Amino acid sequence: MAGDTVYWREQRPDEDGRGVVVRHDGGSPEDHTPADVDVRTLVHQYGGGDFAVREGTVFFARLGDQRVYRQPRDGEPEAITPEPGTEGGLRYADFEVGPDGTHVYCVREDHDAPATDDAVDEPVTTLVRLAADGSESPEVVASGHDFYAAPRLSPDGTRLAWLTWDHPRMPWDGTHLRLADVDDDGALSNERVVMGGPEESVFQPAWRGDGTLHAVSDRTGWWNLYRRADDDWAAYREEAAEYGVPQWQFGFATYGFLDDGRVATVVTREGEQSLELLAPDGTRSVPDVSFGAINPRLRTDGESVYVVVSDPTTPARVVRWTPDEGVTTLRSGSDVDLDDAYVSTPEHVTVPTRDGAAAHAFVYPPTNPDVDPPGDERPRPSCSRTAGRRAPPGPPSTSGSSSSRRAASPSWT
């Protein structure tokens, strides 16, 4: 988001998967990055968090050399990080632009760093601070851990929150949410752990406009949303629902703040996703919208919610939702029309497991108006996809299915 303009990244199959930053400010969507640029970071190999925007200027990682570039709305891309010693040797992701726009905090993965006895052939990951105009060398502001993610500045720019974790844990096993003061020169001081640990997974630190730090934690066995007051954390509501997702990529966001005090959230309940609103007192309301899948990259401008959604009969699309206007589609990912009569609508089922937990699945029943089913009682063929997600006492699932449109499903059903 940048003022009234919303930005997103598209991957285009007809251009070999090239990543393009697109902007929409009320008219038709327009490409922001030029045709010879592929926007994609390779940090952690899985990428994500490929770009950020401040007042119409886009900061992004370019696939070819993995350097960071800045591009004003009516300008050309200019590199703001130095050339690495080897091709793609310095990689950057998860950009956070300071309030005054002069500096950018981000994750850097250094593949040119010399190997140590403890980490042979292991890239060194740190948090760095970049000059937005490229006039300064990148400055390391936090180091010493195997993985970093989600550097997030407070609204006034005086504090920085971020996540770390170390081998052998994955981010859904245990992470630390760290907080530090930002000195006048941009360095960090008074670093401390404010949430998380070896057995607690923390997800998506974020700041409300009044300076209240929020984060999602699974300390109860479920990823619930918390806010910090002084040194204490309070849950909006503790419940058997997931307000977070496994951090396979950078840039995931399952909640955002609205000007009326509520929090817009993407929640997974029994394997199914929904858009919900949390009031400050923890009460929840569910807008009258239904999406088969919601990409965990929610953004808000205080009044509207922007997400990428899909359902069984429509392709992925960028939408805006407001309480007054409902859902408006800004861009559809495909113009291929499928006849709904041939598209199987998945049915959600829950199956008990041997360990006392539950498995969720979407079952695609046979759907074809040109074929009559057999008249006997034999089970009809169907296609099932496990929905994933955890069901304590089991461990978290890091993969899952949704009821979004899948081009292959009609061929089976």
Image: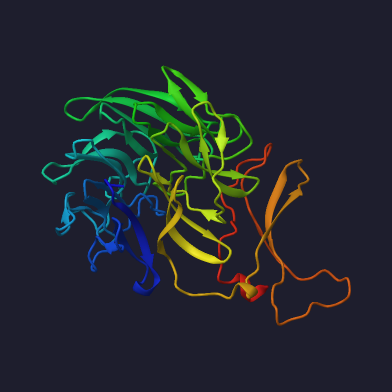
Q: Residue at x 39, y 50 (%)?
A: 44
Question: Could you tell me if residue 196 is visible in this image?
Answer: no
Where on the picture, by quarter, is residue 385? bottom right
Vertical position of residue 241 compared to residue 271: above or below? above
Vertical position of residue 214 compared to residue 297: above or below? above
Outermost residue to the top: 230
Of 212 and 263, which appears nearest the observer?
Answer: 263
Count of numbered badges drawn on the protein: 0
Quadrant (top left/top right/bottom left/bottom right) for the C terminus: bottom right
Horizontal and vertical percent position of residue 183: 21, 25
Horizontal and vertical percent position of residue 289: 54, 51
Is 20 situated left or right of 369 in this image? left
Horizontal and vertical percent position of residue 189: 27, 23
Outermost residue to the right: 376
Vertical position of residue 193 compared to residue 310: above or below? above
Outermost residue to the left: 135
Vertical position of residue 75 compared to residue 368: above or below? above
Q: Residue at x 47, y 62 (%)?
A: 316
Outermost residue to the bottom: 370
Is 90 situated left or right of 194 in this image? left
Question: Could you tell me if residue 408 is visible in this image?
Answer: yes
Horizontal and vertical percent position of residue 130: 20, 41
Q: How is the image coloured?
A: rainbow
Q: Residue at x 32, y 58 (%)?
A: 40
